[in-house]
Image (tube, helix red, strand yellow):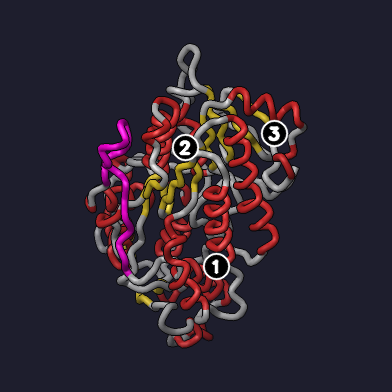
Amino acid sequence: MSRLSEPLCPVRVPVVVPAPVPASAALPSPTPPPDLGALPVPTEEPAEDGDPPSDPPVVLLTGATGVVGEAIARALRADFYVVALRGRRASSHAHAEVPVDLASPRLGLDSGAWSDLAARADVVVHAGGRACFDDNADDFHCVNVSGSRRVAELAHDADAPLIHISTAFVGHIDQAREAAAFLPGDCAARPLTYLESKIAAERAVAASDARACVVRPSVVMGDTGTGWTPEPQSVHGHIKMLLSGVATSACGPHQRLDMIPRDVLARAVAALANVAVRDPSRLPSLYHACAGQAAPTCEEFARQVAETAWRAGLRLAEPEFHDPAKASLADYPGWRTLPGRVRDVLAVQAAGSTILGAGEVFATSLGAPELPGGPAALTADQVLRNVESDVRFVMSARG
């Protein structure tokens, strides 16, 4: 079984958070810190949902143990019999599991197992894939492109609708190409290869004969109200960096950090799956799972992090922004005097910011009346409260 058959997280960036830097360390609060008991944050996985209804439709789900797929599996349980097409890890929310390998022909299944899955499936949700920012084009093609094509073939053979999870940032590929020229030559994070594989995966699905809905989520954050997530994401790495006292953000203050809680995304996918089995003709071909106009700028995001930290008794220095799409990080004043680990973190953050665009607003399908049971559109206040929840979650994890 390939180690590459990993769950999808739309903008996951590996981040190593540095120790606090004395020159830009968090400032001590001049007043006693407030009672942290007012900021409870769960650190354990939510309780398991109940059994499925009698004789429910069957959904085949890839990536069921990923940050996105885990939330989707949990959301599907109420109305579906969830069969996880799993990689290395077992799913705690699926009703049944079948080991597969996205990198292998026919998902690594023999003809009998393939035919059995096709005969059982009522809908297929593809949330699996390779999600990182390295530059291994062969691995991305093998898993994200060829793997998506194979899942689409399975959906076609099952005569079942396919819900394919992509990323909203495919629309920023041109800006990402231009901004990549300013990244340090030794930067380990290269988002272009990932985005190109997601574009090619969408094309592979479109070229198949399966009835498909492509879902394009923006940055995935923790659950609404709690910030809980089984694995930290790029947004949590950004929060950690700010909390550590690094008073620099390698992004433009005007860039929009469109984010969606993973449980909101999961509810949208579950609603789409219900439409797919009840009236496939009403399944949209494209669904934008984004905050849209409610998305904060990077400057507003940093301000919300600082305000949440201040309420917990920690005063942070105001960060300085360096837009990597306009000038190389090496041109940042004092760049060479920064500790190597800090430069590495900022380089990774700069790489992530190359896909954010220049402040454009994403389209959003949240709140669309055509999707019964789907989540409502997010407001700016809700998004900032979700940021606050993620900050509290990160602070709790830091101890």
- Badge 1 marks a residue whose secondary structure is helix
Amino acid type at mark 1: Leu
Is residue 3 something one can see in this rendering? yes
Residue hosting label 1: 192
Q: CA distance from mark 2 to mark 3?
A: 19 Å
Residue hosting label 2: 71
Query: Which label sits on residue 99?
Result: 3
Residue drawn at 67 percent across, 30 percent down: 98
Q: Is residue 113 left or right of residue 266?
A: right
Corner quadrant of residue 309: bottom left
Q: Is residue 31 magenta?
A: no
Residue drawn at 35 percent across, 39 percent down: 40
Amino acid type at mark 3: Pro
Corner quadrant of residue 25: bottom left
| The N terminus, quarter of image | top right
- Badge 2 marks a residue whose secondary structure is helix
Q: CA distance from mark 1 to mark 2?
A: 27 Å
The boundaries of the magenta stretch are 359-377
Q: Which secondary structure dominates the residues rendered in magenta?
A: loop
